[in-house]
Image (tube, rainbow, N blue to C red):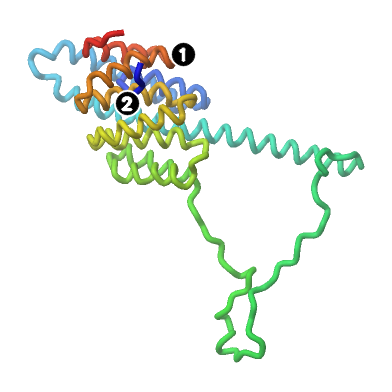
Amino acid sequence: MKKSVLFLSLSLSGLLLFAAQRAGAASDNALQRQIDALKEDIQVMQRQMYRNQDDGSGQNITVRVGEMDENLRDLIGRADMIEYKIKTLEEKIDMINKDIDVRLKMIEGKPIEGGGMSKEAPAKKFDAPVAKDAPASIVGGAIAKGSDLPDVKTKTAEQIYQEGLDAINAGKNDEAAAKFNTVLTKFPDHKLAANAQYWLGESYYGKKDYAKAAVAFAKGYEKYKNGNKGADSILKLGMSMQMLGKTEDACTAFVNLPKEFPKAPDNLKNKAAQLAAELKCKN
């Protein structure tokens, strides 16, 4: 079957389950409590919507559901960052353990695999050249020495990624897209690149630029298929194609999601099945 690229925002139930799983993986009890509270509120509002759908009084509830959706998107983004920070901390602890092991072996006089730490003195640091016998008015403090040069501060991938999440949760989709594009351009091999690709698609989808959203989700599916956003990307790709009127491509995405990702969360597979049924897709 031909493989397209996949699609849109998570359903409320999908967001709840995914956010709960990510929050649990990051061991963040505060996030979990917030998610549980939102879940209870949404269940109450859903029951009210069913009761009031005929008399039109469910409009305010729909607005509140939208607000809940934004809050959940923020929680998901924060859970992503927490998970990344935990992985980074584990790597740092591993490096510290290895460093301690090397130092202990040096103290005990034991051989160190790989040559160990170098005992050579660091190379001499040369100052910036200064004109010989130049007047003080010229040299003075005008020519900085190498050791006096200020450090150039640049933002890390984590900082730019977080700025993108903050922007998308504030409804600033253009700013969010720029931030996530920066992460992908400057840090293409970073651990957050897969997530940045997914949220780039979300930022385009949020501004109803479904063509760019489809391209972003498709790239996320193809390049980061084995990441934690693979199934989400194919679902959103299908939704983007549906909004573009490309029913056949949308069906391809929805039908293939459970085949491509048999271990995907049930809420994603159920959502894909529901959308496939609405479009009367053929398996």
- Name the residue carrying label 1: 263
Query: Which quadrant would the N terminus be assigned to in this image?
Result: top left
Q: Which residue sits at x=28%, y=16%?
A: 251
Alpha carbon distance from label 2 to label 1: 19 Å
Position of residue 83 measured from the top left corner of the image (x, y, whole percent): 51, 30
Position of residue 35 measured from the top left corner of the image (x, y, whole percent): 39, 23
Position of residue 111 measured from the top left corner of the image (x, y, whole percent): 89, 39
Q: Which comes sooner in the sequence, label 2 or label 1?
A: 2
- Name which residue type carries label 1: Lys
- Name which residue type carries label 2: Leu
Vertical order, 80 against 2 (above or below): below
Horizontal side of residue 162 vs 282, given as left or right: right
Q: Furthest-right residue in view? A: 109
Vertical order, 62 against 132 (above or below): above
Vertical order, 142 against 225 (above or below): below
Of 58 and 133, the residue lying toward us? 133
Q: Secondary structure at mark 1?
A: loop
Horizontal side of residue 199 vs 101, given as left or right: left
Q: Residues within 10 Å of mark 1 (few under 14, many from 20)?
A: few
- Name the residue carrying label 2: 237
